[in-house]
Image (cartoon, helix red, strand yellow):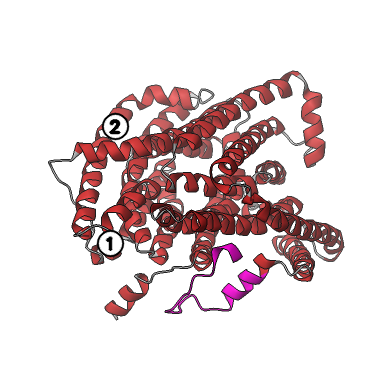
């Protein structure tokens, strides 16, 4: 039995579509757990000072993880591992490389975590200038507890480079599920005992589980890293040279979120919570679509570029981009049309009021505008990383992150000085007379920055790689757009019909209204796509018709994806 389980966990997935589908399924499961987590937080604690403190406390550990743990990220390490595993005595060279990275990472993380823990009382005032003294005190302790999280998540990502190297996507995709299970344990069992600190310990438990689930597979590959005293700093500096642009790019994005949280702390109590809830909701489709396809494509992209097979490299990019466009456009339209029903079903219980629902739905609608562009950016950036060209994504991301901060400040200022401009946005999103609508400036600013990020990276990626082959994407875009608009129209008309049939003041009523309206919209949208004989839809149907457990998965030609 033990061998059968290990064999199943060790299964390789060679096709990008199959791997992306597997990652998407588990990402969906993880996101569902994340939504359950948010629902419990919304209903038990509710938007307010305690939840604002919890979410604000995430920011510094998250920034620390991004700033240091990128040294041990899959995206950076995988090309190094591929290069070493191809050499004579490849496993030993790969093992030595992992030992070096592991030891350097632990050294950096421990030292910097101690420094940050000491300075946390000063840092807390920067992250949340609008907090009261008691909130600041809770923020300091909670953040210090959470400083352990980056250490475990970083190590998990380090060994995750091994599971991705051997395409063990099944076990790799289990990690975020276990992470969310740990957080749920903290919410359900530790919060009643320890308050906000119990939530923090739940995060630590989740981070440990995120790491442990991958350990048996890495040990089986005989590539589990070990601490060493004599670190090969020359090798570490090579990794840092490659990872530095990515680190700075991710740090800029994290910094922009920190600034947004700081601005939200000066607004109505609960603004941080509502911003985070809506951000988490839009992260569900980004995780399922953008991350799944970009993660599944990355090992293939790295190998293709390493072997100088540029035609395959470009075909993989175009194939994955087509699938991202195919999935993203319908999701954008459906989420925009059904936003109130989705938010009410996911979060609307207990202390989460109808005003909270409307404001979170409006915020989610602003975020979701950039779903397709965020997902495509993830793919194109991984294309640059596979080609070991990290400076361009860095410069683009730094600029767009800076613009997020600028837009946040400008929009808040404009909405405060000219309330009529905020009134226009309130009317568009149907949140007139809802308190705290000024916080909508923040998701709007984030979306504007994301759109700038996409257009810049798209222009540069076309110049560097596609060589006028981007026209292959236009047919997919037009067909998906027509299908998406069809879905939206029929879903919107169905909402009015079902509002007469169901009692939308109850959970079941509003769930059935949104669910059935969505199904009707999807039915007519898929019908339109079948009429066009949409290649992406036919590929997905073909993929679903084959069992993922098949032992002989044949990767389709990426140009046909």
Q: Position of residue 233 (x, y in %)?
A: 20, 37
- The secondary structure type at the circle numbered 2 is helix
- The residue to which callout 2 is attached is 112
Identify the image quadrant of residue 484: bottom right
Q: Is residue 87 above or below residue 57?
A: below
* Outermost residue toward the left in this view: 229
Q: Position of residue 539 (x, y in %)?
A: 62, 70
Identify the residue shown where x is 35% and y is 55%. Answer: 160
Residue 218 marker = 1
Q: Position of residue 159 (x, y in %)?
A: 31, 54
Residue 8 marker = none
Q: Position of residue 350 (x, y in %)?
A: 62, 51
Q: Quadrant of the N terminus?
A: bottom left
Q: Is residue 185 above or below residue 247?
A: below
Answer whether labels 2 and 1 touch (C-beta < 8 Å).
no
Residue 269 or residue 165, whichever sits in front: 165
Identify the residue shown where x is 58% and y is 78%. Answer: 545
Q: Nearer the viewer, mark 2 or mark 1?
A: 1
Q: From mark 2 to mark 1, how far is it between C-alphas?
A: 27 Å
Along the horizontal axis of the image, is 456 left or right of 502? left
* Residue stretch rendered in magenta on the structure: 538-560
Along the horizontal axis of the image, is 232 left or right of 377? left
* Outermost residue toward the bottom in this view: 1
């Amino acid at each position: 039995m033990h061998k059968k389980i290990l064999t199943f966990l060790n299964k390789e997935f060679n096709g990008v579509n199959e791997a992306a589908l597997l990652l998407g399924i588990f990402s969906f499961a993880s996101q569902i757990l994340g939504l359950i987590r948010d629902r419990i937080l919304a209903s038990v604690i509710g938007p307010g000072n305690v939840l604002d403190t919890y979410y604000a406390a995430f920011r510094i550990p998250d920034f620390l993880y991004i700033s240091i743990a990128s040294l041990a990220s899959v995206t950076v390490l995988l090309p190094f591992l591929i290069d070493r595993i191809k050499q004579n005595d490849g496993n030993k060279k790969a093992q030595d490389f992992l030992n070096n990275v592991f030891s350097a990472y632990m050294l950096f993380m421990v030292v910097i975590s101690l420094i940050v823990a000491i300075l946390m009382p000063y840092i807390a005032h920067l992250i949340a200038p609008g907090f009261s003294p008691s909130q600041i005190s809770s923020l300091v302790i909670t953040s210090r507890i959470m400083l352990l999280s980056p250490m475990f998540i970083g190590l998990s990502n380090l060994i995750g480079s091994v599971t991705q190297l051997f395409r063990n996507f099944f076990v790799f995709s289990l990690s975020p599920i276990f992470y969310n299970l740990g957080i749920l344990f903290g919410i359900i069992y530790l919060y009643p005992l320890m308050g906000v600190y119990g939530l923090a310990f739940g995060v630590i438990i989740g981070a440990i589980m995120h790491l442990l689930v991958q350990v048996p597979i890495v040990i089986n590959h005989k590539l589990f890293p070990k601490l060493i005293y004599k670190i090969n700093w020359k090798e570490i500096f090579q990794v840092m040279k490659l990872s530095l642009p990515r680190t700075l790019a991710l740090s800029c994005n994290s910094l922009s979120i920190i600034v947004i949280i700081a601005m939200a702390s000066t607004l109505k109590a609960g603004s941080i919570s509502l911003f985070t809830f809506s951000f988490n909701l839009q992260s569900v489709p980004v995780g399922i679509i953008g991350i799944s396809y970009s993660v599944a494509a990355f090992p293939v992209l790295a190998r293709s570029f390493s072997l100088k097979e540029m035609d395959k490299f470009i075909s993989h990019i175009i194939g994955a981009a087509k699938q991202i466009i195919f999935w993203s456009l319908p999701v954008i339209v459906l989420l925009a049309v059904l936003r109130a029903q989705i938010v009410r079903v996911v979060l609307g219980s207990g202390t989460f009021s109808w005003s909270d629902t409307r404001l979170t739905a409006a915020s989610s609608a602003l975020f979701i505008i950039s779903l397709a562009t965020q997902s495509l950016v993830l793919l194109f950036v991984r294309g640059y990383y596979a080609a070991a060209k990290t400076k361009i994504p860095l410069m683009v991301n730094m600029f767009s992150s800076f613009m997020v901060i600028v837009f946040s400040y400008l929009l808040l200022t404009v909405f405060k000085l000219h309330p009529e401009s905020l009134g226009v946005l309130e009317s568009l999103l149907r949140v007139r007379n809802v308190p705290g609508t000024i916080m909508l400036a923040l998701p709007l600013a984030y979306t504007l920055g994301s759109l700038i990020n996409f257009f810049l990276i798209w222009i540069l990626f076309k110049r560097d790689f596609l060589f006028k082959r981007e026209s292959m994407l236009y047919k997919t875009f037009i067909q998906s757009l027509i299908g998406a608009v069809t879905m939206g129209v029929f879903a919107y008309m169905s909402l009015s019909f079902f509002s007469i049939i169901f009692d939308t003041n109850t959970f079941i009523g509003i769930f059935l209204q949104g669910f059935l309206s969505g199904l009707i919209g999807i039915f007519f949208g898929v019908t339109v796509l079948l009429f066009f004989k949409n290649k992406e839809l036919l590929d997905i149907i073909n993929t679903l018709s084959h069992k993922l457990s098949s032992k002989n998965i044949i990767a389709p030609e990426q140009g046909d994806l």
